[in-house]
Image (spheres, helix red, strand yellow):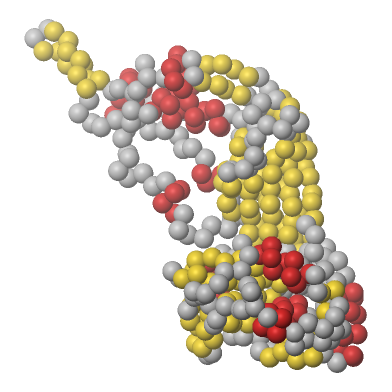
Amino acid sequence: MTNDEQLERLRYKGEGADLDFKQAQYRFIGCSDHEKSELLKDILAMANAYRDGPGYILVGFKDQTPHPAEVVGISSEHIDDASLQQFVNSKVQPKLDFRYEERLFDGKTVAVIVIPKQQRPFYLTKDYGKLGKSVVYVRRGSSTDEASPSEVAKMGRDDTEKGRPRIELSIEDEQNRPLPNSFELTFIRFDNDGLPDYENNVRMNVGGVVHTMPSPVPVNRHYWRDGADYHSVLSRLIQARLSLTNRSDFSLSDAKLEVTCITPDGGQVVMMRAGHLPKEPDSRDRSLFRVTPAAFQHLNERITVDDRGSESVCHVRLGNLLPGETGRAQDDLAILPTGPGGYKLRVRILAGEINYPIVEEHTMEVSGPVREMGFKNLKGLMLAKYRKGNAASSSAATRADEKALE
């Protein structure tokens, strides 16, 4: 799906061989062949255009060159992608790869047609509407014309000579070393329902009688549960650093990685951005100052994890890659195996110039004990951080937390 950042960038780009603005929606449903052929012609012309990356037809945008295109939206009929795919590919040779989508942008409904760079030329198998059989329509600049026989021959030669994309995928750990194929981890499991709320009571001696009362300082009542989550995640964490180098003689546009982690038994593996891993818990209540990743969802993140389906999918957007250029994911990928066993990291590589996704896999054998822990074990884990390296510390906050833990 085309994101807001891409559409905003295209708004500021003038019409050309790879971009066409259309103010009004195309006539399609229940219309005559003559009317529908206008849409078909524009798709064919864009598909045959001389360009290095994908072509875009943006509907609901008013061209205002030299100013950014105005978003006017579409309010008429809505077109279904499946119906348009069937319509185009029942009349065009060879099979044309494209995508149609309708979405909200700048508060208005717009339509986007994306046509990846692919083997040309495309043409009709028979006359349709105002279009002729075997005529190759091509977009030149901001206009559409019929290609000459020499142009048609050159299209085939150019695309053949360009060759297949050559890419190099790198999967490393957080130390920039090749990601190992075997890991020794510990799988800690807590009964979170059996963990109490955290309380930091104050003891006061009044007239020889010790009274216990709640601390006047607000505390994090989820401290124990946060600690259990933190330690169970940290003990089974695998971090992967992903990058892609374009070894082709041409640019790759809209390069993207889709990452999944597969288990032999089909179980789901949790994946997330390393920056979204749970932080070491604080016994003090900092909820008023806590900033969660959700607060930044309005920003266009270039690495996201979609866990709504049967398996989590990590999407890494790398953008356009020049020949020889390396694109790196903006954050490491955190992989959390569910237990010992074999795992397979599968990466699908996509770009406007890659007709079919390139798939690479990295196998991992994970071993290690599974430990069931209770509240007493958890307190021992969390107390260890104060005892290790803090023997000489006299911080009041440290002493208070250590006393509370004991």
Which one is nearer the viewer's eye here, 30 or 375?
30
Write down the quadrant of residue 27 in the picture.
bottom right
Write down the quadrant of residue 246 in the picture.
bottom right
Residue placed at 52% from the left, 84% from the top?
Answer: 62
Residue 113 pos. (x, y %): 65, 72
Q: Quadrant of the C terminus?
A: top left
Vertical placement of residue 322 versus 222, above or below: below
Q: Is residue 101 visible?
A: yes
Residue 331 pos. (x, y %): 58, 51
| Number of numbered discs | 0
Residue placed at 51% from the left, 88% from the top?
Answer: 64
Residue placed at 55% from the left, 32% from the top?
Answer: 233
Residue 389 pos. (x, y %): 46, 28
Vertical placement of residue 263 versus 76, above or below: above
Q: Is residue 340 left or right of residue 400?
A: right
Q: Is residue 168 visible?
A: no
Residue 94 pos. (x, y %): 85, 72
Q: Quadrant of the N terminus?
A: bottom right
Which one is nearer the viewer's eye here, 204 or 253?
253
Q: Is residue 401 left or right of residue 187?
A: left
Which one is nearer the viewer's eye here, 405 or 368?
368
From this viewpoint, which residue is outermost toward the left? Answer: 207
Vertical placement of residue 398 versus 258, above or below: above
Residue placed at 57% from the left, 22% from the top?
Answer: 188
Write down the quadrant of residue 125 in the picture.
bottom right
